[in-house]
Amino acid sequence: MNIDQVVTQCQAAGVRLVRFLYCDNGCTIRGKLVPMERLAGRMASGQGLTLAMQAMNMLDQLQPVEGMGPVGEIRLVPDPDSLVILPYAPHSAAMMCDMIKLDREPWEACPRSFLKRMIARLADAGMTMQAAMEGEFSLFREEAPGKYVPIDTGLCFSTISMTAAADVVDAMVAAFEAQGISVDAYYPELGHGQHEMPLRHAPVLRAADNQIWFRETIRSVAAQHGIIASLAPKPMPDQAGNGCHIHWSLWDLEGKRNVLYDPADPYLLSKVAYHFIAGVLTHLPGLLALTTPSYNSFRRLQPHFWSSAYTAWGPDNREAAVRVASGVWGSEATSINMELKSADSSSNPYLALGGLIAAGLDGVRRELTVGDPALIDPGNYSDAERAARGIRRFPTTQAEALDALEADPVLMEALGPVLANAYITVKRSEYAAFSAEDIDFEIKHHIYKF
Ligand code: GLU
Ligand code: MG
């Protein structure tokens, strides 16, 4: 799509305001709006934004990051191909933006440009990535200020929960349809009021954009039904957490051959697949700071909660950090894919997916190898067995994961010093803020922001 096509499509849909959106270092979705008569010009010139916004945490506390103060600005330049007409806001459309400097180069602190850089590195290695994120979310009614009660207490995959949520879920599916986003499945999950709606896979940049539309759509449609939808990793400490598992497959540059697949291997995996898994597991402690980045994320990552808690991999092992997802009958070659369980919707999807590529590519470049697959819950091995298999427990707090990120030269190089420094500063400030308060404060803010 080009600018004219965006304008024509918005006019046809009766749009008045267009959201220019980005996801920041606190992983909050923010943006500015442009009226229709300014749209073409503003798409070409970008919408001005203070560069301090990449130093803002999820509590709107501006952090002291060098070069991100009151002086200086960047431009939010929308990607025309990301256009969606919003079914949940009147006369509104939205696009995802890159952060571009006044010299027209991508800003070093732009998360979406970071993902594009990693996609380019993947292409240099002869590969492209398809990805899908499968978001779980909790549906609540706010019975009194701050008192969130799940809309159902039904069992996992139970019809009682389906019916309890049928109206709002129908509206969610309709809203995705209206935005041209394909839903892959829907089911009630284990936790009270917990539901899941994976989207179809797409080229990885589009998959990241789709995760933004997912967060926006789920929350907004629920709000129209008087329901609070939260994608927070652990909105109820005594219930299952909300993951947002990342599925991915690697393809040749033409997108014709799934390079993860090798029919001669017992798990149908190619050498590249094993190297990529090894890279992800090697870098996982630091990668978690990108894929499960919030204070609340680490309440979810517990052994035996199907969220993953160890650096293990295994075929269809839902307690392993990397599950090798079995392929579709008869089309294994095209459908075999990997799933990172240690990911949630409090992430910035551009950072999460870019970090995943950087980690995996390092494994491919260095030809790293994996240990034996975990064929049982890795939490059920003894400490000695885990040690012998090279399986490590994840960092158990946001602060530890951020330390691991800072100590990981591959991820730090990939992010680059400007983005890495701003991100780590912002996230450490969130750790300081939440660890100084009680659990109610943590839950309230994560339920509301994600
Ligand atoms: N709710 C689980 C999690 O925290 C995932 C359950 C499943 O879909 O396997 O990731
Ligand atoms: Mg699930």
Image: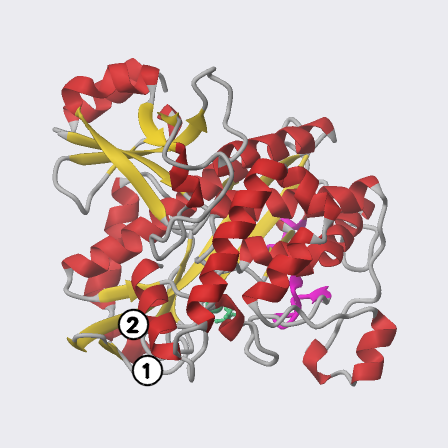
Camera-side residue of 97 and 138: 97
Q: Are marks 2 and 1 in contact (CB under 8 Å)?
A: yes
Image coordinates for residue 118, horizontal then vertical, percent? 62, 35
Dot 2: element: helix
For residue 163, the mark is none
Q: How crowded is the residue under tag 2: few (<14 C-alpha within 10 Å), some, or many (20+)?
A: many
Instruction: Say whether residue 131 is visible.
Output: no
- Ligand 2 has an atom within 8 Å of the beta carbon of the residue at disc 1: no
Kindly indicate the quadrant of the structure image that contains residue 128: top right
Residue 361 in the figure: left or right of residue 207 = right
**Residue at x-position 19% and y-position 59%:** 223
Of the 4 image quadrants, the one containing the N terminus is top left
Q: Amino acid at mark 1?
A: Gly
Q: Position of residue 161 (x, y in %)?
A: 30, 76
* Alpha carbon separation for disc pair 2 and 1: 9 Å
The one of 204 and 75 positioned closer to us in this rendering: 75
Q: Is residue 263 left or right of residue 81?
A: right
Q: Is residue 73 visible?
A: yes
The residues colored magenta run 313-332
Q: Quadrant of the C terminus?
A: bottom left
Q: State left or right for residue 289 relative to residue 61.
A: right
According to the image, label 2 marks what residue? 162
Q: Position of residue 257 (x, y in %)?
A: 68, 36
| Residue located 29% across and 56% down the image | 218
The residue drawn where x is 38% and y is 27% is: 73
Q: Is residue 26 magenta?
A: no
- Where does label 1 land, which residue? 154
Q: Quadrant of residue 236?
A: bottom left
Badge 1 local density, few (<14 within 10 Å), some, or many (20+)?
Answer: many
Q: Check disc 1 and report its element: helix, strand or loop.
A: loop
Task: Give the residue drawn at x 30%, y 38%.
Answer: 31
